[in-house]
Image (cartoon, helix red, strand yellow):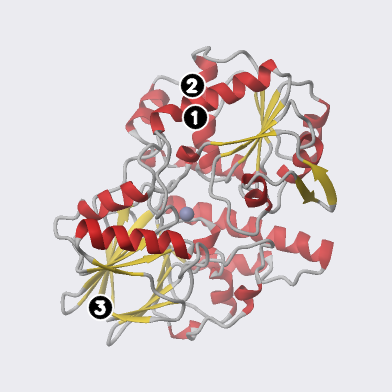
Amino acid sequence: MHVKLFGAAREVTGSCYLVESSKAKILIDCGLFQGTTLAHSKNFKPFGFASKSLDAVFVTHAHLDHTGRLPILIKNGYKGPIYTTPPTAKLTQLVLEDAAEIMHEEFERSYTPKLYEISDVAGVVIQTKVLDEHKSIEVKDLKVEFFNAGHIFGSVFVKVTSDDGECVVFSGDLGNTSTPLLKQKDFLADTDVLFIESTYGNRIHEDESTRDKLLKKTVVDTIKNKGVLMIPAFAIERTQEILFELNNFVENKLIPPVDVYLDSPMAIKASKIFDAFPKYYSREALRLIAVGDKLFDFPGMRMTLTRDESKIINESPRPKVIIAGSGMMNGGRILHHLVRYLGDKNSTLLIIGYQAHGTLGNHLYQGERQVNVLNERIDVKAKIVSIGAYSAHADQRMLLDWIKSSPKPPKRVYCTHGEEAASAALATCIEEELKITADVPRMGEMIEI
Ligand SMILES: [Zn+2]
């Protein structure tokens, strides 16, 4: 059995692994390369394998950098199954339809070429088959098993075992330990080889126990200053985690009353999908549901699905909290709010997620005082606050602990899905602390298991 990397090697996006045995050919994830525009030029290059030759595709979770090239696979003639957990199936459809729509908008605005149309996403939906966590399936001489990765709703890591007993685990993205909405990730299954994500391979999140205090302080300060708190949020998971915390603040009267707008059609729809699959919630969330609490609804909370509803936010009095996508501020409704309020010294931009190089979010995170948003030059006067502990990703310590959680440590580890420095730092820690050989593979590299 061998593995070939077709993305997320020495970079964060574009996850795609080809696993080949003597009889079978399967793909783990088929993610989009993301940068300043959604349709990064790398996505237009051929995959490096024949789509039609694949026996099956497995998807770890719904994020675009793990699913965004699935429609291209279908366009290229792939007719086989795409296995995901039931919530991932629904969330992937949502994410891909949204991506197709944004590509269409980018095309209309600046003739940025489109990777695919909304109609191409339909093929993905039709070919999707569900495989739940802790279930396995056989594809010729390979057995593929899903485990809970605790990263976002429905996320899994994948173990592939060949007929002759060789195994490899693909971590997908691994969850932060402090995600109150989700069940904790499973221990690492015993394996010969591990491909592990390293988004935060060189970082330790701040103390998770202080993150709700920081969020509360940021909200209270905004209310005091009569400002606007903008929270660019990833529509899936981060948004629901924040709503879950705000729900707690409001219902327990820990903050003064304030209007909160969820201004993201995708996040609104994703929240409904979460509610349709309660078994993926944590025990704490289930306990609240059992006593009749709606996790994402509280006094002052408004969901603005349509454009007209969204415009109401502009006229509504301050203070107010606006949660809008996209998370890295490279598109979506957040841009309109940034144009309006980034120049206001009483307002705050709260960054709660990873900001890839080249994105507007990264420029702001790095403290640039002048940025271009929707072709407008803006002097940034708003406060920029960031809370790393809201990350949906495990940090360096958690990644190392997860490797240690395996009943039998892997013989070799490959660090992927991280900027080069982050992957290299994690590899060094794995070698020094765990005494396991660790590498940072390159795009296109083939690894014998
Ligand atoms: Zn992810």
Q: Secondary structure at mark 3?
A: loop
The amino acid on which the numbered mark 2 sits, given as a three-letter code, is Asn
How much space separates mark 3 and mark 2, taking CA atoms? 47 Å
In this rendering, which labeled residue sits more in front, label 3 or label 1? 3
Q: Secondary structure at mark 2?
A: helix
The amino acid on which the numbered mark 3 sits, given as a three-letter code, is Ile
Eyeballing the image, is 439 above or below 92?
below
Can residue 294 be seen from the camera position used here? no
Q: Position of residue 194 (x, y in %)?
A: 28, 66
How much space separates mark 3 and mark 1, taking CA atoms? 42 Å
User: Looking at this view, is 103 or 367 the one in front?
Assistant: 367
Read off the residue under disc 3.
Answer: 449
Mark 3 surroundings within 10 Å by alpha-carbon count, few (fewer than 14), some (14 through 19), many (20 or more):
some
Read off the residue under disc 2.
Answer: 248
The amino acid on which the numbered mark 1 sits, given as a three-letter code, is Phe
Image quadrant containing the C terminus: bottom left
Read off the residue under disc 1.
Answer: 244
How much space separates mark 2 and mark 1, taking CA atoms? 6 Å
In this rendering, which labeled residue sits more in front, label 3 or label 2? 3
Mark 1 or mark 3, which is nearer the start of the sequence? 1
Residue at x 52% of width, y 41% of height: 238
Asked if the residue at label 1 sits under 8 Å from ligand 1, the reply is no
Q: Is residue 377 left or right of residue 360?
A: right
Asked if labels 1 and 2 touch by Cβ distance under 8 angstroms, the answer is yes
Q: Is residue 205 left or right of residue 325?
A: left
